[in-house]
Image (cartoon, rainbow, N blue to C red):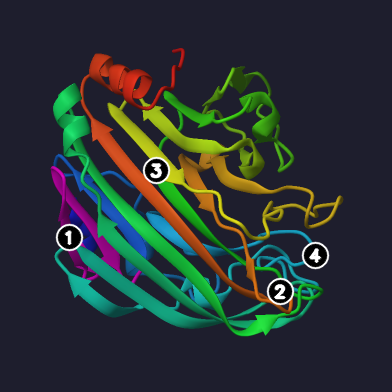
Amino acid sequence: MLVSLQKIDSDLLVMPSGDDAVAVSNRLQGRIFCELDGELVHRFNAELAANPSPDNFNNIGGNSLWPGPEGGAFAFNYLPHTEWLVQPAINIQRTETHLTQPAKTVVGKTITLRNRQDATVELEFSRTVLPLDIGRITEKYGLQGVAYRTLDELQAVEGCDLAQTLFCAWSLEQFPGGENVIAFGRCGKNAAGAVNTDFYGNPGERLQHYGQCFQLGLGGKDRFQIGVNHEFQPELIGAYDRQRSLLIIRRTWAQDGLYFNIADNDQPRGPYSAADGYSIFNGGDLGFFELETIAPLQLNVHGRGVNSLLWSETMIFKGESQELHACLKQYFQVHIEG
């Protein structure tokens, strides 16, 4: 429940949405959380939120905004001669409220990051959160629902030299579980060519393709991740959680701009070896999964990186299995097996 969040952040910014509410926490770095049917939908580590580490990664949950790339030559999660880390600007620095209304919340902060090239970039980090009306969908299929739209932006205070710095807005939305969860996606083109498994831990037979759609069985002990190439016109990703009777849909829109590899590996084929607009992470023994949306980097007329804007939508439905399957198949045109 949002009460557990309010114990940590007494100034939690809450907006009504659908059958419940969506909330934004400045204390928790601008993370977004949803409540549906009186229960917190997102993963939330209350103990860690109450007692965050100043050094180690505070993996609290919710929907957080990160800078990409994670790995490769321009990594923000590997500095020169270091192991994997999350920098203080993302890990502990709070956001501030820029606007709060019943149907619009804007939070932001100015952050400074280093990358593996030892280059420094100063970014204006902002999140605009808007409740999203999905009433006609929930009414048609007899479901409960909560939904929101975000505009996430990272804007360089000064333009960046692409020989030293790449950055993009990357929304990582965490949900508890994995077992009995089927992730999926739909593309405008053949899904088999769209899916990128060049992260780490290939999902193997857990990944299946059906024309324009794919499905991915989550769970198990192993961690793995896939991406979905923006050039194949991906329309959505999502997850069906049989245990919690939830259907989750995430959408973003392809843009003109520079897409690049955000993967957490050395990216041996270089930073432009992938161009994903979505990603799905299976946490394995961590006990959670992520549905992620990714924006390109926008360049100015001089070819310098200036900003990255990410429009995303999250829709969460709760109901009986038959109605959830009907909604997914008929409204979102995705058929899953299992």
Give x and y (percent) for residue 112. Answer: 58, 83
Q: Nearer the viewer, residue 179 or 126?
A: 126
Q: Distance between the residues labelled 4 and 1?
A: 40 Å
Q: How far apart are marks 3 and 4 (CA)?
A: 30 Å
Which numbered disc covers residue 175?
Answer: 3
Residue type highlighted by circle 2: Asn
Q: Is residue 227 visible?
A: yes
232 displayed left or right of 241 = right
Report the residue marked by disc 1: 15
Q: How far apart are marks 4 and 2 (CA)?
A: 8 Å
Residue 230, above or below 68: above
Tell me where the magenta segment starts and ends, as one range: 6-29
Query: Residue at left 18%, top 34%?
Result: 136
Report the residue marked by disc 2: 115
Q: Earlier in the sequence, mark 1 or mark 3?
A: 1
Residue 303 falls in which quadrant of the image?
A: bottom right
Residue type highlighted by circle 3: Phe
Q: Which of 247 and 282 is in front in this view?
A: 247
Q: Is mark 4 on a helix, strand or loop?
A: loop
- Reply yes or no: does residue 60 show up in magenta: no
Q: Which of marks 4 and 2 is nearer the N terminus?
A: 4
Q: Looking at the image, do the residues carrying marks 1 and 3 touch, with CB atoms under 8 Å apart? A: no
- Reply yes or no: does residue 21 show up in magenta: yes
Which numbered disc covers residue 73?
Answer: 4
Q: Looking at the image, do the residues carrying marks 2 and 1 touch, with CB atoms under 8 Å apart? A: no
